[in-house]
Amino acid sequence: QKEVEQNSGPLSVPEGAIASLNCTYSDRGSQSFFWYRQYSGKSPELIMFIYSNGDKEDGRFTAQLNKASQYVSLLIRDSQPSDSATYLCAVKKTSYDKVIFGPGTSLSVIP
Amino acid sequence: ETGVTQTPRHLVMGMTNKKSLKCEQHLGHNAMYWYKQSAKKPLELMFVYSLEERVENNSVPSRFSPECPNSSHLFLHLHTLQPEDSALYLCASSQVPGSNYGYTFGSGTRLTVV
């Protein structure tokens, strides 16, 4: 079983819709969860991090964490063509542990 | 300059060459990392440095040799590479190793081994 799994996509959504990106992880002891966005040919940039079960909102982005189900998701409301990118889920067990990245989900927002 | 800067942006090298990748961070962070990103594969952690001391070496072949002369600079020395080493090499930094506030990545070096 891979440590962090994501659907590779591509996930296509129309402009203005909600994009839902999902991630599952295998280590039940994981404590910190991150979402990075990576445009084609560019480096990853941190969008959000979440530690507690429930939802965390930042602008059009909402991260959702369910530790019992070992599941973290990212919702993008009012999707824009500029949101088209690969989204990387990353997981860390405790402080000072290395971050494990998933393979990423490619998102395409269609105008 | 701000953030994390990597040079060169692109590098083509033969299997017998020796080259070095450079990373510099201007964020006052104490931890620096080398990651390898190959097509269709997750980011692979190669090395972690904390306050210039290597704290993790993720079973990386010896043809990759890191160097961290100070907390702002990180190098990756390359020699006798193989074609399968062609990838995007990313440098990152964080306040402390495994920071809960995530990493800041450089723009990467696109390496092609011919």
Image: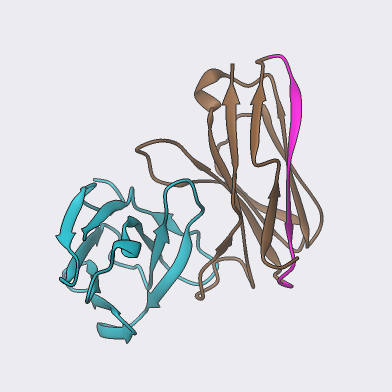
Chain colours: A cyan, B brown
Prevailing secondary structure of the magenta residues: strand
Picture residue at 42% right of the left edge, 56% below the top: A38
Seen in the image, is B91 located left or right of residue A100?
right
Picture residue at 40% right of the left edge, 61% below the top: A37
Q: Position of residue A101 (x, y in %)?
A: 40, 54
- How many numbered marks are there? 0
Picture residue at 74% right of the left edge, 73% below the top: B28
Q: Quadrant of residue B114?
A: top right
Q: Is residue B34 magenta?
A: no
Can you see residue A5? Answer: no
Can you say which quadrant of the picture contains the C terminus of chain A?
Answer: bottom left
Is B11 placed above or below A9 here? above
Q: Quadrant of residue A34?
A: bottom left
Can you see residue B8? Answer: yes
Seen in the image, is B75 located left or right of residue B62?
right
| Closer to the camera in the image, B91 or A59 | A59
Picture residue at 28% right of the left edge, 68% below the top: A80
Range drawn in magenta = B16-28
Q: Position of residue A1 (x, y in %)?
A: 24, 45
Q: Position of residue B107 (x, y in %)?
A: 59, 52
Farthest front residue?
A: A111
Q: Is residue B24 magenta?
A: yes
| Closer to the camera in the image, B103 or A80 | A80
| Closer to the camera in the image, B25 or A69 | B25
Seen in the image, is A19 located left or right of residue A89?
left
Q: Position of residue B72 (x, y in %)?
A: 78, 61
